């Protein structure tokens, strides 16, 4: 099978070995560098350190605003995401099959309003309607790319935010990840030019209403649809926990590496 002018060919044994060697050595080097950096003597940043409020005898870097916002919002996010998970599985089990995706989108919308604000979600909805309509009408990849990147780059200067620091941080994430999800769906529609929106509107609503459980990556629309349909077709399926176990083990490994040198307990005398 060829893709355009490219013909996929399996790699030879030595090429696979080289790829594995590069990946393993780079991964090992990353851990070594992190460990070395974390053990570097503190010299110039002692002025910014204060006693940690959550780890005994540890120091906290007051300049890390991102970490401060995360600490202030993590409890609220955990509660909302747990609530969403419970309702998600309840909807799959008890709502009629033809209305499951609509119900999931409504649930996700309400929880996102609770996490951020009605104003924030209305703005994202308006942006979604405009960009999606233009993309479906033109089927031109440039339209969603330009509009969604404009939202990501200039959104913080244009869109209103709630004065509360707690909601401000969550609204920032909602604007950013909302724009990325809009972009993913519109690119899917531009790629499948024969596809009508009427045939896929339920999946679109469910995708937009799904909470961003990952803080860095957004699942592609087509992958989301495949996984959701697989789950709906077998609601009583036992979830494979292999990936969860590996993720937990990897998180424990990461936790052993003190990336931030500000976590060192020993004080460096000022010079």
Image (tube, rainbow, N blue to C red):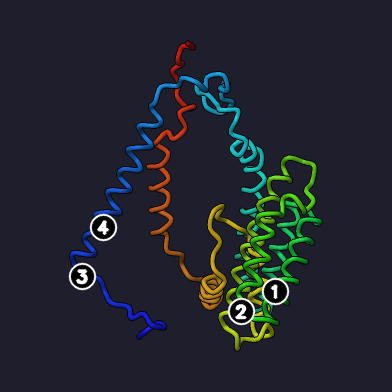
Which image quadrant is residue 244 in?
A: bottom left
Secondary element under disc 2, as helix, strand or loop, is helix
Indicate which disc, 1 or 3, sits on the residue closer to the N terminus: 3
Looking at the image, which is closer to me, 102 or 176? 176
Indicate which disc, 3 or 2, sits on the residue closer to the N terminus: 3
Secondary element under disc 3, as helix, strand or loop, is loop
Vertical placement of residue 35 versus 123, above or below: above
Secondary element under disc 4, as helix, strand or loop, is helix
What residue do we see at 62% from left, 54% from top? 81
Residue furthest bottom in the image = 194
- Residue topped by disc 2: 189
- Residue topped by disc 1: 132
Indicate which disc, 3 or 4, sits on the residue closer to the N terminus: 3
What residue do we see at 71% from left, 76% from top? 134
**Cβ atoms under marks 1 and 4 closer than 8 Å:** no
The residues tagged by marks 1 and 4 sit, at their Cα atoms, a distance apart of: 41 Å
- Residue topped by disc 3: 12
- Residue topped by disc 4: 20
Indicate which disc, 2 or 1, sits on the residue closer to the N terminus: 1
Q: Is residue 105 visible?
A: yes
């Amino acid at each position: 099978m060829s893709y355009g002018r490219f013909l996929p060919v399996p790699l030879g044994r030595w090429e696979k070995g080289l790829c594995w060697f590069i990946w393993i050595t780079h991964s090992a080097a990353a851990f070594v560098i992190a460990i070395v950096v974390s053990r570097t003597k503190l010299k110039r940043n002692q002025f910014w350190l204060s006693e940690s409020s959550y780890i005994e005898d540890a120091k906290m870097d007051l300049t890390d605003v991102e970490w401060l916002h995360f600490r202030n919002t993590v409890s609220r996010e955990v509660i909302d995401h747990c609530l969403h998970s419970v309702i998600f599985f309840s909807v799959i089990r008890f709502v009629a099959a033809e209305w499951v995706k609509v119900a999931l989108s409504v649930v996700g919308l309400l929880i996102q309003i609770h996490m951020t604000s009605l104003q924030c979600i209305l703005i994202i909805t308006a942006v979604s309607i405009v960009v999606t309509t233009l993309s479906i009408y033109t089927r031109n990849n440039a339209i969603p790319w330009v509009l969604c990147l404009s939202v990501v780059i200039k959104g913080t200067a244009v869109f209103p935010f709630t004065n509360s620091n707690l909601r401000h941080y969550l609204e920032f994430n909602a604007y950013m990840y909302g724009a990325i999800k809009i972009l993913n769906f519109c690119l899917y529609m531009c790629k499948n030019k024969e596809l009508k929106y009427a045939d896929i509107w339920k999946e679109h609503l469910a995708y937009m209403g799904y909470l961003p459980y990952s803080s860095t990556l957004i699942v592609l629309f087509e992958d989301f649809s495949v996984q959701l349909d697989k789950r709906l077709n077998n609601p009583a399926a036992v979830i494979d926990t292999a990936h969860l176990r590996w993720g937990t083990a990897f998180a424990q490994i990461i936790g052993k590496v003190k990336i931030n040198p500000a976590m060192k307990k020993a004080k460096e005398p000022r010079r």
